Image (spheres, grey):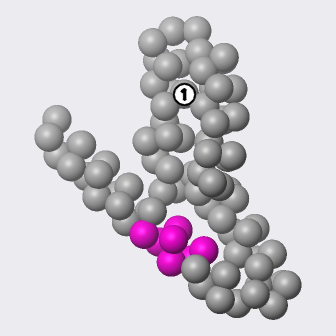
Amino acid sequence: MFHVIAQAPVFFLLLAMARSDRGLELAFAPVLHIGLTQLIYIIPAILFSRHRGETETAKGLVIGAALTFLLNATCNGFLFLNR
C-alpha cells in the first residue's frame, strides 16, 4: 500500500508538469524505478517501527523492500538488455 500512496501523487504531479513527450517519460520514471524511489518512504517507516519497538515489523519492511528492489532491478535489467 505504501507504493500506491507514495507513487500516485508523484506520478500525477510529474504528469501535470509534462509539456512534451520527454515530460511523459519523466512522469513514468518513478514508477519504473520503484526499487529506488521506495527509499523515500521505507526508511522512515523502518525507523518508526524500530522506535516503537516493533522489530519484527521493521524486519518485514526490510525484507519487502529488498525483494521489491531485486525484482525491479531484474525487470529493468531485462528491459534494458533487450533494447
Residue for point 59% across, 56% down:
38
Q: Is residue 27 left or right of residue 2?
A: left
Residue for point 58% across, 9% down:
19
Q: Is residue 12 left or right of residue 78?
A: right
Query: Residue 4 falls in which quadrant of the image?
Result: top right
Q: Is residue 45 left or right of residue 61?
A: right
Which segment did they paint magenta?
Answer: 61-67
Instruction: Say above or below: 14 vs 42.
Output: above
**Dot 1: element:** helix
Q: State whether the magenta stretch is mostly helix, strand or loop.
A: helix
Percent x, y for residue 26?
52, 28
User: For the residue marked with disc 1, what is the amino acid?
Assistant: Ala
Residue for point 60% across, 74% down:
61
Residue for point 69% across, 59% down:
41
Asked if the stretch drawn in magenta spans residue 62, the answer is yes
> Looking at the rendering, in which quadrant would you find the N terminus?
bottom right
Percent x, y for residue 20?
51, 9
Q: Nearer the viewer, residue 49 or 77?
A: 49
Instruction: Say above or below: 4 vs 59.
Output: above
Percent x, y for residue 21?
45, 12
Percent x, y for residue 55?
70, 90
Query: Residue 56 falls in which quadrant of the image?
Result: bottom right
Residue matched to label 1 = 27
Give the crowd class for mark 1: few <14, some 14-19, many >=20 residues within 10 Å: some
Query: Which residue lies most toward the front here?
Result: 1
Asked if the stretch drawn in magenta spans residue 6, the answer is no
- The count of marks equals 1
Query: Which residue lies most toward the right here?
Result: 52
> Looking at the rendering, in which quadrant would you find the C terminus?
top left
Query: Which residue lies most toward the top here?
Result: 19
